[in-house]
Image (cartoon, rainbow, N blue to C red):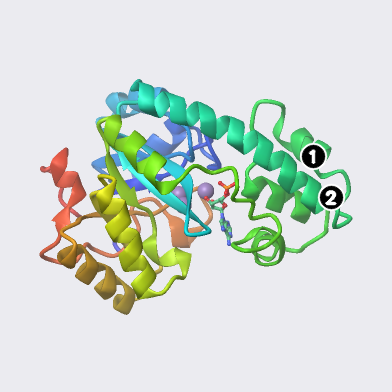
Amino acid sequence: MLVRGIDLHLHSAASDGALTPTELVHRAREQGLQAIALTDHDTVDGLAEARRAAENCGIQLINGIELSCVWNGMTLHIVGLQIDPEAEAIRELTRLQQDNRLERAKVIADRLGKQNFGNVWDGVRQMLGPDRVPARPDFARYLVDKGYVDRIQQAFDSYLGAGKLGDVKQFWPSLEAVVKAIVESGGVAVIAHPMRYKQTTAKLRRLILEFKSYGGQAIEVAVANLDSGRIGLLTELCRQYDLYASCGSDFHMPGRPWQEIGRFPPLPAGLKPVWNLWAPQVCQG
Ligand code: AMP
Ligand code: MN
Ligand code: MN
Ligand code: MN
């Protein structure tokens, strides 16, 4: 699969990625990208460092975030692009999300503890240090490191994935709150990886209509590991609902070839690329 010139969905160590924002920007540069968005989970803390690195190596940085919310009993991820990280709406929401994440992590640790996985909270805190709030991938790593499961994927499949005991949703804000905070911060709201929620097409249509009613404008279409049938469906939805189309790898760390920076299929012809709003000179690769 080709490396594309722009990647609008990337994580750094400011959330659950492995690279510092600087390392991430350098890796994107090495892969030949012209523009990237840093979209850490529920935080904008990596953006200032990423901006310094991007300016130094001549890559365009779009300020981004990936916000968790709950809709229709499901956890959804909404990406915000070109937000102003200093805007009051986004500052308030990220503060709330960090508090939510801490409370949620305690509940997850408690639930896993009841499965006889040792002192989960202390174990995960020891692993991460006091500054980082544990997220589900950290709990997965704990279960692997302690030998309770063999692989990260197994930890998600059995204990942490959608609908499992570690999938604690009640702390997330509503879709409405999240989309409106992005819009109020000057950004464009994007439904992240729309096919990962495994919902029927009818429900996906309902989600899109509600998302649009709050000011949402785009969905991710060019994402890794989607077959042509699913990309076709997303293309059709973009056209029907007059949405912008986004693209991104959801990169978290080196060593996962299925989630490498810039590696995803091309955007189907005829769609409106969301990056034309700020990076019209970027070609797709
Ligand atoms: P959290 O933000 O705590 O809800 O954790 C969600 C994160 O876990 C996602 O952003 C992914 O990085 C990771 N994740 C979710 N599902 C899986 C999976 N099946 N395998 C590996 N990582 C996953
Ligand atoms: Mn993640
Ligand atoms: Mn996501
Ligand atoms: Mn992501």
Q: Alpha-carbon neighbours of circle 1 within 10 Å: few (<14), some, or many (≥20)?
A: many
Name the amino acid, label 2.
Gly
Residue tagged 2: 113
Is residue 136 shown to the viewer in this render?
Answer: yes
In whole angstroms, how far apart are the C-alphas of marks 1 and 2?
8 Å
Please give left or right for residue 195 compared with residue 205 in the image: right
Q: Residue at x 26, y 52 (%)?
A: 212
Please give left or right for residue 14 compared with residue 234 in the image: right
Q: Residue at x 23, y 49 (%)?
A: 217
Q: Residue at x 51, y 26 (%)?
A: 95
Depth check: 238 or 206 in front?
206
Name the amino acid, label 1.
Trp
Instruction: Looking at the image, tell me whether mark 1 or mark 2 is earlier in sequence order.
Output: 2
Please give left or right for residue 278 compared with residue 162 in the image: left
Depth check: 89 or 60 in front?
89
Asked which secondary structure carries label 1, the reply is helix
Q: Against 222, is 276 above or below?
A: above
Check the picture and name the quadrant holding the C terminus.
bottom left
Residue 152 — which label? none
Residue 121 — which label? 1
Residue 122 is situated, as x and y percent measured from the top left of the image, at 82, 36
